[in-house]
Amino acid sequence: MTPNRISKFLWLCMLAVLCLAAVGCSDQRSVDDYLAAVEAIGEPDFDASKKEQPGYMDSYRREQHELYRQRAALLLEACRKHPDDERVPD
């Protein structure tokens, strides 16, 4: 990982921690608040020029997997806290 990717990853981890801390402090988050937090997590940067480098795709997929786990945790919490919202699947 390049220093730029590491700093982005650390920034995203800090953002996720802050989001989770905010959830613990306030049970009044709306579904829209959760969706905004999911969007803030975003996607990892993909550099197509590095695609053929050994280990790049594994590193990218690990980072992507972690971000997807964070997004899934937020969406699950939104569904549990707001089961009657029309956007929550049955």
Image (cartoon, grey):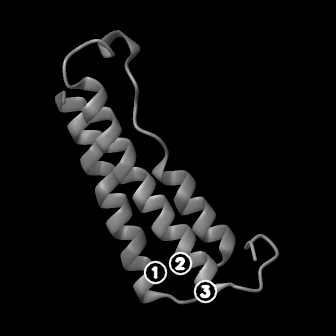
Q: Secondary structure at mark 1?
A: helix
Q: Which residue is mark 2?
A: 77
Q: Residue at x 70, y 85 (%)?
A: 83
Q: Earlier in the sequence, mark 3 or mark 1?
A: 1
Q: Which residue sits furthest right?
A: 86
Give percent across and percent down for residue 87.
77, 70
Give percent across and percent down for residue 41.
46, 52
**Crowdedness of circle 3 by 10 Å Cα count: few (<14), some, many (20+)?**
some
Q: Residue at x 34, y 37 (%)?
A: 61
Q: Which mark is residue 81?
A: 3
| Callout in the foreground (2, 1) | 2
Give percent across and percent down for residue 47.
37, 19
Horizontal relation, residue 38 to residue 90: left or right: left
Give percent across and percent down for residue 79.
63, 78
Horizontal relation, residue 6 to residue 76: left or right: left
What amino acid is labelled 3 in the image? Lys
In the picture, the quarter occupied by the C terminus is bottom right
Q: Which residue is mark 1?
A: 23
What amino acid is labelled 2 in the image? Glu
**Crowdedness of circle 1 by 10 Å Cα count: few (<14), some, many (20+)?**
some
Horizontal relation, residue 48 to residue 2: left or right: right
